[in-house]
Image: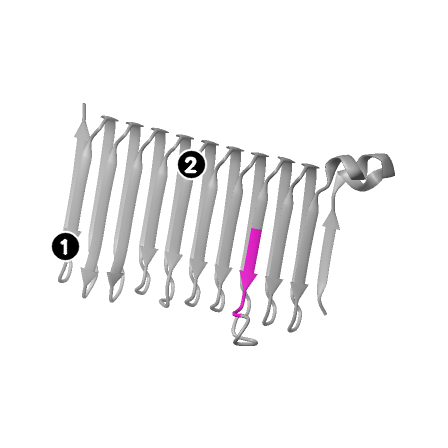
Amino acid sequence: MKKVIFCAAALMMGTVVMAQSNVSNAVMTGWNNTGTVHQTGNLNNSKMNIRGGDNTFDIDQIQIENKSEVQIGQPSVPDNANMNHVRIRQVGERNESYATVYGDGNSANINQVGNNNDSFLTQTGTGDEVDVDQLGHWNASTVHQLGGSGNFADVNQNGNSDVSHVTQEGTDAIAKVTQNGWDNYSQINQNSAAQDEATVFQEGIQNKSWITQIGSGDHDAIVRQNGTTNISVVDQTGITQDITVIQND
């Protein structure tokens, strides 16, 4: 059974429909896929293309010109994505979220509140999890979980023009990013065999952090930066490398 529920408060009266013009387009093939779409406001747009089985999605967009796109399953490979879940909630103006999922048993929760925030997500492995929360304006998050399994990424950005990039290609990697302030930047690349962990906490203005973890795995990196224009670069190779970086001004 396939089920989609569309709800837009704008559609209650014929005189209001033309003014609000929310648009939702869903294409679902396979079996037992379910989804809900709620759009309230003006010019919100959602697009879903769902393949495979037992996948679920929830889209909630409020206010003006928010956009979301969800792709579960590859168009050229039928039935290759199962038991995935994507939830997107956007409140404000001109927020955009894009989620592409090609694996099995993955989950993603995207929450954006403010204006002009962007989220980009790719999951091609098994049992990966993503949680993105952005509060403010002009923030951007990119998470790529590619071909591995059991990876977890948690991104929290509160402020304006903060940027986070997370790439995970191994197994059981953990990436946690918290940025509070303006123009902060974090990049985490985890490409080890297993069990890398990277944690970044930045508070202030124009702090920057780069963490790269490769090799056999079991690396641990913690970066805490408070103030203005602090910079941290961490490269870990081999096995079981641990580092903690704390910078304040």
Q: Going 67% across and 39% down the picture, which residue do you hit? A: 43
Left or right: where does residue 3 sit relative to residue 135? Answer: right
Q: Where does the image place residue 78, in percent across and percent down from the top left?
A: 56, 76
In the rendered image, which quarter contains the N terminus? bottom right
Q: Give, as a three-letter code, the residue at label 1.
A: Gln
Q: Is residue 5 magenta?
A: no
Which element carries disc 1, helix, strand or loop?
Answer: loop
| Highlighted magenta segment, given as a residue range | 69-74
Which element carries disc 2, helix, strand or loop?
Answer: loop
In this figure, which residue is indicated by the disc labeled 2? Answer: 139
Q: Where does the image place residue 106, in percent across and percent down from the top left?
A: 48, 62
Left or right: where does residue 61 sit relative to residue 152? Answer: right
Count of number-bearing discs: 2
- Quarter where residue 232 is shown: top left
Within 10 Å of disc 2 (Cα), the crowding (few <14, some 14-19, many 20+) is many
Height in image: 100 above or below 204?
Answer: below
Height in image: 248 above or below 219?
Answer: above
Q: Give, as a three-letter code, the residue at label 2.
A: Asn
In this figure, which residue is indicated by the disc labeled 1? Answer: 241
- Residue at the extreme front: 18
Q: Going 44% across and 61% down the picture, which residue do you hit? A: 123
* Camera-nearest label, 1 or 2: 2
